[in-house]
Amino acid sequence: MTEYKRKEFFDDPTGIPLDELDFSSSRLFESGTAWLPYFERLRNEDPIHYQKDSPFGPFWSITKFRDIQFVDKNNKLFSAEPSIVMGDVILDEKIVEMFIAMDNPRHDTQRAAVQNVVQPTTLAALEPLIRERIGGILDSLPEGEAFDWVDKVSIELTGRMLATLFDFPQEERRTLTYWSDLGLSLPELTDGNTDPDERIEGLMECLSRFTEIWHQKAELSQEELEKNIDLVSMFIRTEKTKDMVERPLEYLGNLLLLIIGGNDTTRNSLTGGVLAMHQNPEAFELLKSDLSLIPNMVPEIIRWQTPLTYMRRIALQDVELGGKLIKKGDKVVMWYVSGNRDEEVIETPNKLVIDRKNARQHLSFGFGIHRCMGNRLAEMQIRVTWEEIMKRFSKLEVVKDPVYVQSNFVKGYSEMMVKLTRK
Ligand code: HEM
C-alpha cells in the first residue's frame, strides 16, 4: 500500500479509478462520512468488486443487500474459518477458538451450548435490572453542561450489563470493558500500535479471573445454580458445558465472544442513536409525539449505525455471483455497512426514519447460522434506554463532531459531547 493511496481517502473519491481506492483502510470510518461515497460508488459501478492489493491481501467486496444475504446464508459455499476479519486472526488461534469463526458441525454444537444465556425468560428477568441501571445513569447526568455520552452513558451502561450477565463485581466492570477492547485491539483492524504482549497478558488474566469465578460457582448447591441467571452458572449447569473449565481455550473463547459481542456493538448503537436523532431532528419530534414508535425505532437505529461494518468469508468452491467468478479460496468481505444503505432495498437509506416499514429488514445482525445470538438482548437494552431517556429529557444536543473509532471493522465512537435539557 503506497502513501499516495492512503492520502486519497480524505479526498472525494469521485473520478478516481476504483482500483486505486483501498476499501480495507481503517481510516475510512474514522472521518465519520468518507465511507458513504466510497461504497455508493461500488454499489453503482462494481457491486462485487475485486481489490487485488491491500495490507490484508486481495479480497472481494460484496456491497449490495441481496448479494450479502446470499453469501451469509450459504455457509456451505462460504466458510467463516479461521477468522471473520480481513486479517487472518481475530485472536491468536492458538489461544482461543470462537464459534463465530467456526463452520458446522462444530459451530452448532458450541452455539447450542451457550445460547440459553439470551433466551426470552432470561431477558425478561434482566429487563427490570437494566431499567433500574439506565435510570440511575441518566439521573446522574449533568444538565445544561456538555459531557461525553460515550463514557458516561454508553460504556457505563454496557459495562454494567456485562457485569450483570457474568455476575462480575459491578465495581470492576471497567475491567470487562478493558478485556473487550483488548480483544478488538488488533493491528489488523486498527492499523494501530497494539502491544501483543499486553494483549496476551490481559486475555490470560481474563481467563484466570473467570476460572476463579467458575470454581466459586461450582461450590453452590444445584438449587442455587438453577436460580442464577448469569452465564457462568449456566455453563456449569448445562450438560454440554459443565466441564468447560477444563477446556480453557473453549472457555476463554466463549467468554470473549460474549464480552466483545455484547460490548462495542451495543455501546455504539447507544451513541449512534443520539447522533442520528441530532442529525434528523424531525425524527426526534415524531418520537416525542408518539413514544409507541420506540420498538420500531430500535432496529432502525441499529441499521443506521451498523456497528460492525463487515464479516469475512472464504469461498469453499468457485462461485459465480453477479457475473463475477469468485474462486475457491478467495477472501470475501460482506459489507453490511453498504448493504444497509442499498437504495434498491431501503428507501432514503441515509435518513433515520423511525416509523419505517420493515425496519427489521437490515443486515446489521447478519444472516444464516451465525446470525447474531445477542440481537434480542441488544434491542432490549436500546429500547429500555430510549424509554428512560424520553421520560426525562426534552432535548439532546450533540455540541461537537464526535470522535470516531479508527477501525475497519468496528463502526463507532470514542467521544461524543452532548448537552441535555430535562423535562
Ligand atoms: C447492536 C448490537 C449488535 C450487533 C450489531 C451485532 C452484530 C453481530 C454480527 C454482524 C454477527 C455475525 C453475523 C453473521 O456472521 O452472519 C454477530 C454474531 C454474534 N453476536 Fe452479535 N451483535 C450485537 C450484539 C450482541 C450482543 C449483546 C451479544 C451477546 C450477548 C452478541 C453476541 C454474538 C455472538 C455470540 C455471535 C456469534 C454467533 C454465531 O456465530 O453463531 N451480539 N453479532
Image (spheres, rainbow, N blue to C red):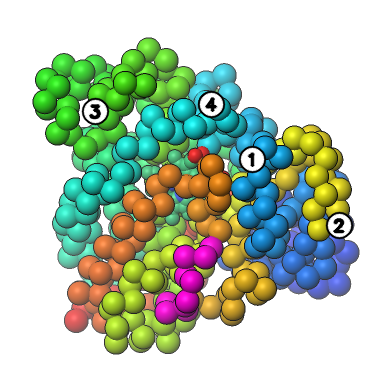
Q: Position of residue 77 (x, y in %)?
A: 71, 40
Q: Answer above or below: position of 208 versus 295.
A: above
Residues 34 and 332: in front is: 332
Mark 1 to mark 3 CA distance (whole Å): 32 Å
Query: Which of labels 3 and 2 is toward the front?
Result: 2
Quadrant of residue 138 within the rendered picture: bottom left
For mark 4, give the secondary structure.
helix
Mark 3 to mark 2 CA distance (whole Å): 50 Å
Mark 2 to mark 4 CA distance (whole Å): 33 Å
Q: Circles 3 and 4: CB distance less than 8 Å?
A: no
Q: Residue at x 55, y 27 (%)?
A: 105
Q: Circles 2 and 4: CB distance less than 8 Å?
A: no
Mark 3 to mark 4 CA distance (whole Å): 23 Å
Q: Position of residue 291 (x, y in %)?
A: 28, 78
Q: Amino acid at mark 2?
A: Gly
Mark 4 to mark 1 CA distance (whole Å): 13 Å
Position of the C terminus by quadrant: bottom left
Q: Which residue is mark 4?
A: 106
Secondary structure mostly seen in magenta is loop
For mark 3, give the secondary structure.
helix
Residues 176 and 273: in front is: 273
Q: Which residue is mark 2?
A: 323
- Residue segment shown in magenta: 353-362
